[in-house]
Amino acid sequence: MILIIQDKIGINQWTKAELQQLCRRTRNPMTMHKCLHPRSDVDRVYVERDQGGRGLMSVEETVNYESHSLKKYTEGSRVEFIRTAGKIINTNSENGRQEYRNRQKIERKQNWHDEPMNGQHLRQTEDQASKETWQWDQALRTNYRKAKIDKPTNDLKCRLCKQKDEKVSHIVSECSKIAQTEYKEGHDKVASAVHWSICKKHELPHTEKLYDHRAEAVLENEKVKLLWDFNVQTDKVIEARRPDLILINKETKQCQVIEIAISGDTRVVQKEDEKIG
Ligand SMILES: [Zn+2]
């Protein structure tokens, strides 16, 4: 579609509304094929992929950008007819196409960032210097969203624990009411996979496939001893005194205590501190 339009730039004079309509039509198939959530942020679609966006080319921006190029070309032409024809080309920036493109990029990112719901995750993770695209749509109908955006209710607390704000990040990894069921299951699966990998590495008995693996409480050979979900005797009472795995190296007499924590992106640092401390 962009290619078809590029051909007509400088010949057809589109209005801003027409260009935006064309942009909408390029996004519709994405929504139809479930590649784009109907409530997701429009600016994000056009932000570059390494910035957490979807990297789509905007029809409006392409037309404006190419108009700049065409205007510049006609202005420099030695043929008077072309110079005259070029005068009818409208551009919306005095400072050339690169300035226009840079300005668009900044504005898009800022609009996405400032959008109350969709920009939330971007704001929460911006200080964790990472370009990895863990940005995802904040489109679930949580109480937090209802209270902040839709406003039919003022209760933004979680329906289950009634303690914390009901945000997606809370439901996915923080809620104390789900901790013993869903999170525990996720945690145990990860712990089991770690256990299986250690068995493989140190030639302890293990199944060929990970999904057949059932962790034994104690496994050992001449070199190592591996304990699973084992109560450790500690001098003083500490809250989490049940590590998931303990690997004892019989040769070096070293002992590794392995704890698995599943947490949301925004709480990684906090979880690390809890586990080390
Ligand atoms: Zn909760």
Image (cartoon, rainbow, N blue to C red):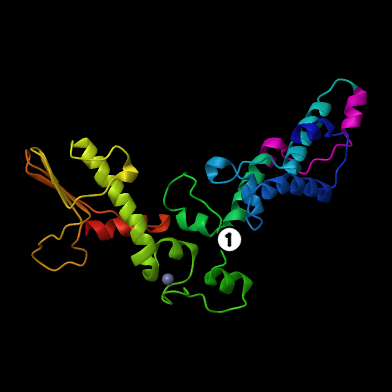
Question: Is 82 positioned to the left or the right of 35 in the image?
Answer: right
Residue under the image location 50 percent in, 57 percent down: 121
x, y percent for residue 71: 81, 32
Q: Is residue 248 above or below residue 277?
A: above
Q: Residue at x 62, y 77 (%)?
A: 152
User: Closest to the observer: 48 or 262?
Assistant: 262
Q: Quadrant of the C terminus?
A: bottom left
- From the top left corner, tell me how far across and down residue 245 is, in percent: 20, 51
x 6%, y 38%: residue = 251
For the point 16% across and 57% down, which residue is it? 230
Q: Number of marks in the image?
A: 1
Q: Look at the numbered disc 1 and say if its residue's Cβ is closer than 8 Å to ligand 1.
A: no
Residue type indicated by callout 1: Ala
Residue 82 drawn at (x, y percent): 89, 25
Question: Residue 174 appears in which quarter of the rendering?
Answer: bottom left
Residue topped by disc 1: 139
- Write down which quadrant ligand 1 falls in: bottom left
Segment colored magenta:
80-100
User: Taking 28 as reference, is 82 above or below it?
Assistant: above
Indicate the secondary structure of the residue bearing disc 1. Answer: loop
Is 92 magenta? The answer is yes
Residue closest to the eye, 96 or 188: 188
Locate residue 53 relative to residue 218 in the image: left or right: right
